[in-house]
Amino acid sequence: MEHIVIIGNGIAGITAARHIRKASDCKITVISGESDYFFSRTALMYVYMGHMKWGHLKPYEDWFWEKNQIELKKAWVDHIDFENKELTFSSEETLHYDKLILATGSLPNRFGWPGENLNGVQGMVTKQDLEKLEERTSSIKQAVVIGGGLIGVELAEMLHTRKIPVTLLVREKGFWSGVLPPQDAKMISEHILAHGIDLRHETELEEILGDEQGNVRAIRTKSGKEITCEFVGLCAGVKPNINFLKNLEIETEKGILVNEFLETSIPDVYAIGDCAQQRKAIGERKPVEAVWYTGRIMGETVARTITGYRTPYQPGNWFNSAKFFDIEYQTYGWVFNKPGLNEQHFHWQHESGEKAITIAFDTESGKFKGINTFGIRMRQEVFDKWLNEGKTINHVLSNLKAANFDPEFYEHHEAEIFKSFKNNLQST
Amino acid sequence: MSRIEQNMSVTGEAAASLNTGQKISTLLGMSGLIILCLAAFNLNFPNKVLWLSIALGSITAGIVWFAHATYSSTHAGIKNDGVWFKSMTNRGYVAYLTGVGLTGFYILLYFFPQYLGLRAEGDNVGLIALFDPLSYLLSGNPASQWFVYGTLYTIAILAFGVKFLWKYRHNRYEKLRTFSVMFFQLAFAFLIPEFMSRLNDDGMNLPYYDLKNIWPLNYYNFEQYRVDGFLSSGNIGLALLIFGVVSIFVITPILTYKYGKRWYCSWVCGCGGLAETAGDPYRQLSDKSLFAWKVERWVVHSVLVFVVLMTTAVIYSYLGYDSSKYWLTRDVFLIGVGTFLTLLFAAIWYFKREELQKDARYGAIGYLVIILGLIAFHYFSGQNLFLFNAESLRQAYGFLIGAIFSGVIGTGFYPIFGNRVWCRFGCPMAAILGMQQRLFSKFRITTNGGQCISCGNCSTYCEMGIDVRAYAQKGENIVRSSCVGCGICSAVCPRGVLKLENGSTNNRITAEDGVVGDNVDLLDLLKQKSL
């Protein structure tokens, strides 16, 4: 019986395991040193905030794995002997595989800041990070979070619920403005400030300062300002977790290089999820995408390949979502922070300052390219269809109601949005 | 600035500190409760009107003020911060104390009302006497233990309703729903029945009738004394009796077809009303395991069978044999019940068989055979209908289900098992509406393509113990008989993935076309049952 070994029990690895089990009877082992059972990484923050307990993070009950004959092994992999198809664990135990799937996820970026290894400096990605955070923040007076991305704002919100004052350092003029157009970024910045987060734009970390015991005592910004703090959250993006592969013969760059079938340079070894890097970028997507749902799709895809239907990885139209404190964000298609060539952004904002949409469209053809929505829920299926059919912004705006996914009785803004478009953009 | 003092949240438990407003409002509300306790210990208050007003006023004001102190300074939005760190909402010491206190109150209320001051002869004393002035004002009669309970119940729904409105003030669905349960409790459950009994005089004998309380939830509606009461009230009484029958056989199915059982369970029903308002802080405590789901389905449907048998036996017991006097004789009635159940079973089997799980099929066949068997046995052997006499069946139901299940466990155990234990495991009305919802309704909860990140907020905060995430992560519509449509799963979802909808019944149950955003054709995989 073929033995399929998966390293990593995140969404990519577990999806692969489940789909391989659906389609085959081979032996499956999932290895993770992080946790006994698969858990929702996306919900780690809710445990810290007291919304959920650890048990709620497990999408499947504990008996599920044995019932479906998916073996779980709690261990860290130290070395892989690709030649003999053998893994060595940190306990020096070994394990033979026939096919290997690498789904090791990602780690917080560290850019070599002085003091980045002090006690009290950490990212927020793993279960161990959460435990460290609990321990560290139990009695601190001030925290600093570096980086204005999705994890940054989540970490700020987490600390905020524990009533720990947070200073959030963002390199750009607006929050997440490497991704969000300026008006969207501005709105989110204001929302974060309204929650009492000390959000500082155009501020960069220069150095983390420690005391004699090796604990964080302050940070210094590039402008020379010192901020006293006992905790520094590093949230300036993530990178593939592939350190343990560095000196092996497998081809890596930023991540583990894979072709469209998610095959690595070594036969019978696949890489999926955050740790994989596409040799050829797909559409406008980045070669490394640390996104929850692409991990899931890669897991499904590799499962098909392994069980006999060699299938290329084909993520559909880009979409994503997030929540910034109380503002929900969804995006469908591509809305870049700056309009591209022959492209224009139509922006509408509600007077409350907590609802907005930004639509990217082609200036000449009027073709709809993508939408950001804030505080209004939209139906993915509808936008997926419109993107596939190449609808125009006119079509999108006049049918926007069909895409609304807000709860019943919610206020609708389609008429206002359409009017704003007619008045401000269509005449130009 | 105050700070939650936590240990590892992975293991939970830490007390959240209260702000000044919360402290003073707690003091105010508790002082009102203490007045009621003193009255219960037979302290005789000289001016009952004044002291009752002070007591009820402080309780109401205390709760409303607490809500204000908790939510007014926060930004509108979901704020479940620290729910699992608080003793009250994480089955801590305070929760157990509250549970014991509530349970004790229910035991006194149902079984020992004399300790609360109820007197059959002469004037009431103690707690119940304190409520006499209000009862005289509304109905012209002295208070009973049920009046005391009804008043406190209504206050709980109104005051905690205000708290709920504040907490979910960003969500119009939640606001409208809460206004609705507050209105139905105040008007239909509390005031109208009191006013109806005020109209009683020699020529009128209206029963105390909460019009929104539908059989089988009000399992006593067709008992002899009720039916006699209806019939003795002339046309109005007859109209009420007919309304009672029509509401279960006509109104309820139509509304449930159009809107799902939520129109009742989370917009109208009093039990649901208390669960949604006073019970809201405990919604996350419901058990989501597969085991709990299996128990739930067997128990709730068994209660339904029990109530059908009991009501049949009771009605049967007071019908006559003589077909010249009444068209509805014992035989006609019994054959009618048997025929109706058989036709209903046959219709479901014919049209919806594919939608029934295996154990549901076995259960349905088993129960039908038992009921028909008992009826046949009765004819052939001349034994009591359903082996027991009607009165003992009625008493057993009243005690086990009416008192213990819906009261003592259902509400007393809010802080331990969550707020919908009764609705989920015990309510026969929920079982009927649930079958209609599962098999014939336009209602479903849809999921938004591939946006679900499996975080589990929806499952955690589902008071009915539905593992919403299990459906959402597969992109499957949620069509469950137990869903009361409270809308909280949709509200707590950080990605806007869930939406309560009424739509076409075609393709209501199947997932639309897999998880959007994925160009691989996974339809075949999705069609297979999940692992």
Image: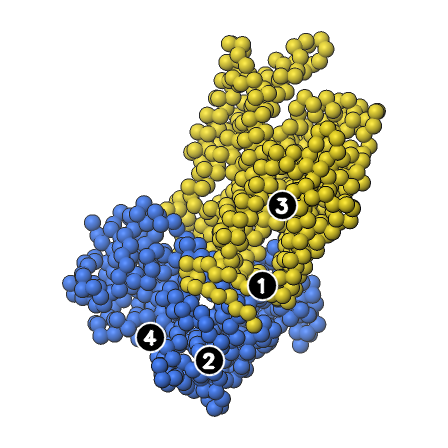
Chain colours: A blue, B yellow
Judged left or right of residue A180, residue A107 is left
Which of label 1 and label 4 is nearer to you? 1
Residue at label 2?
Answer: A229
* Residue at position x 46%, y 47% in the image: B288
Q: Position of residue B279 (x, y in %)?
A: 58, 49
Residue at label 3?
Answer: B274
Q: Position of residue A208 (x, y in %)?
A: 41, 84
Residue at label 4?
Answer: A254
Classed neighbour count for the residue bearing mark 4: other residues with Cα under 10 Å, few (<14), some (14–19), many (≥20): some
Which of the marked residues, 2 or 4, is nearer the chain's N terminus?
2
Is any part of residue B92 visible from this angle? yes
Residue at label 1?
Answer: B18
Chain holding disc 1: B
Q: Amino acid at mark 4?
A: Lys
Q: Are marks 1 and 2 in contact (CB under 8 Å)?
A: no
Residue B219, compared with residue A248, is above or below; it is above
Q: Amino acid at mark 1?
A: Leu
Quadrant for the N terminus of chain B, please: bottom right
